[in-house]
Image: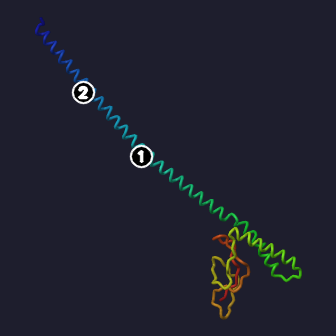
Amino acid sequence: MKRPIEKEMTMTKKKEKKVEKKVEESSVEEVALSEEEKSQAQITALKEQVAILKNEYAKAYADAENMKKRLQNDFEQRTKFQMAAFAKELLPVLDNCERALAQETQDEAYRKGVEMIYSQLKNTLAKEGVQEIEALNQPFDGHFHQALMSEAKEGIEPNMVIEILQKGYVIKDRLLRPAMVKVSE
């Protein structure tokens, strides 16, 4: 038989074991809770990181689209006006052909040849968007005309183009050379 002290000790040991068991169970729960909390915190952090990355992606995508549009616009502008410098160099040739056609000649073959060159040159420039500025009997426009002289004439409104001294040209919607004109006063 067990003595009362031994009995008490056994009881105390049993209680200690129960307490230890409860402590272990609660620490397992705490560990489980802390693992769950850690997982939740990790999920929250990852969601925030995904949101930041989505925002950065959207910004990068928008920047790329803007760059694409800007480059496309630059390309279109460059293509549209690539002929401008070359056409500007050809305008004096066109002027000289007009001067040659204005002269009287007995040689019809020569005149026909100059007419063909003039016509071909004018058609080629027109295909690239080079057009003559209509100035005669038009109101003076400083954007397209350059007044070299003025003259008072009766029956003509003031500020009207009365004579073209040198033709002006535009390429598409850009001025190549202004028309040199005489304007009424």
Q: Secondary structure at mark 2?
A: helix
Residue 169: give its label: none
The residue under label 1 is which amino acid type?
A: Ala
Question: Is residue 136 shown left or right of residue 34?
Answer: right
Vertical side of 27 occupied by 152: above or below:
below
Which residue lies at the image location 27% right of the left edge and 29% below the top edge? Answer: 29
Residue pushed farthest top? 1
Which residue lies at the image location 74% right of the left edge and 73% below the top edge? Answer: 122
Q: Check contact, mark 2 vs mark 1: CB within 8 A.
A: no
Name the image quarter holding the C terminus. bottom right
Q: Quadrant of residue 129?
A: bottom right
Q: Nearer the viewer, residue 170 or 4?
A: 170
Identify the residue position indicated by label 2 in the image.
26
Which residue lies at the image location 50% right of the left edge and 53% below the top edge? Answer: 62
Question: Is residue 161 shown left or right of residue 18?
Answer: right
Q: Position of residue 119 (x, y in %)?
A: 77, 74
In the rendered view, how is the structure colored?
rainbow
Q: Nearer the viewer, residue 150 or 21?
A: 21
Identify the residue position indicated by label 1 in the image.
51
Vertical side of 178 occupied by 47: above or below:
above
Q: Position of residue 52 (x, y in %)?
A: 43, 46
Label 2 to label 1, Cα distance in Å? Answer: 37 Å
Q: Position of residue 118 (x, y in %)?
A: 78, 74
Q: Secondary structure at mark 1?
A: helix
Vertical side of 99 occupied by 7: above or below:
above
- Mark before the other along the chain sequence, 2 or 1: 2
Q: How many numbered callouts?
A: 2
Q: Position of residue 170 (x, y in %)?
A: 67, 72
Question: Is residue 39 shown left or right of residue 91?
Answer: left
